[in-house]
Image: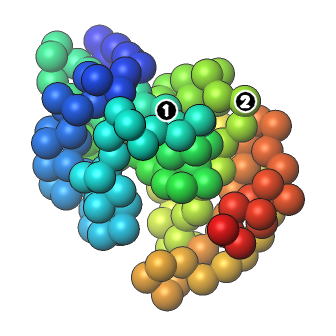
């Protein structure tokens, strides 16, 4: 049975190498270098409000994780082991985030159909089309008490 656990900043420090390896191995090459560098640099001292992480574990085996940096305004991504996809692991992780955070934001490339399905199934709303870091058309999505003005303001910083 898969268990979802919220990760504290100090526990994240210990799990960081595993999360980086897991992201590279099972992220289907969709996790950007910028996001991986953000994980590498994340420390207890620079965690901003709205930074939240959780893992999905099955019998002590990491099978998925989700991470939001400043509600997703800095970074947001989810990775699920291929053999655990279509088993509601991603949905459970995202729902736990929505229950824990007031609001979330994410960006998903137009051709990342599994992630878009997950976002829409979980009630996120697409509110803007932009160009992502890889040059692809990318949807900006929000969930919970999201605000397009907060999103726009964060992009001006």
Q: Is 110 drawn above or below residue 83 in the view shown? A: below
Q: Residue 70 location in percent, x, y?
A: 58, 44
**How far apart are labels 1 and 2 at the CA level?**
11 Å
Question: For the C terminus, which image quadrant?
Answer: bottom right
Q: Which residue in the protein does label 2 denote?
A: 102
Q: Mark 1 points at which residue?
A: 52
83 relative position to 156: left or right: left
- Classify residue 141 by image quadrant: bottom right
Residue at figure coordinates x 77%, y 66% from the top left: 152
Residue 53, position as x, y percentages in the image: 42, 32
Q: Residue at point 47% right, 79% down?
A: 133
Q: Is residue 109 left or right of residue 156?
A: left
Vertical comparison of 157 with 92: above or below: below
Residue 56 seen in the current view: no
* Relative to 78, residue 50 above or below: above
Q: Tell me if 80 is positioned left or right of 89 in this view.
A: left
Q: Is mark 1 on a helix, strand or loop?
A: strand
């Amino acid at each position: 049975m898969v268990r979802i656990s919220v990760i504290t900043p100090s526990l994240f420090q210990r799990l960081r190498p595993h999360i980086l390896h897991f992201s590279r191995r099972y992220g289907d090459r969709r996790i950007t270098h910028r996001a991986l560098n953000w994980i590498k640099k994340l420390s207890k001292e620079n965690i901003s409000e709205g930074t939240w992480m959780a893992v999905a574990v099955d019998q002590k085996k990491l099978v998925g994780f989700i991470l939001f940096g400043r509600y997703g305004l800095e970074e947001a991504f989810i990775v699920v082991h291929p053999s655990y996809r279509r088993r509601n692991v991603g949905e459970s992780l995202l729902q736990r985030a929505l229950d824990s955070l007031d609001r979330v934001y994410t960006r998903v490339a137009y051709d990342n159909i599994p992630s878009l399905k997950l976002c829409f199934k979980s009630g996120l709303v697409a509110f803007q089309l932009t160009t992502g870091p890889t040059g692809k058309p990318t949807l900006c999505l929000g969930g919970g008490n999201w605000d397009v003005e907060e999103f726009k303001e964060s992009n001006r910083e």
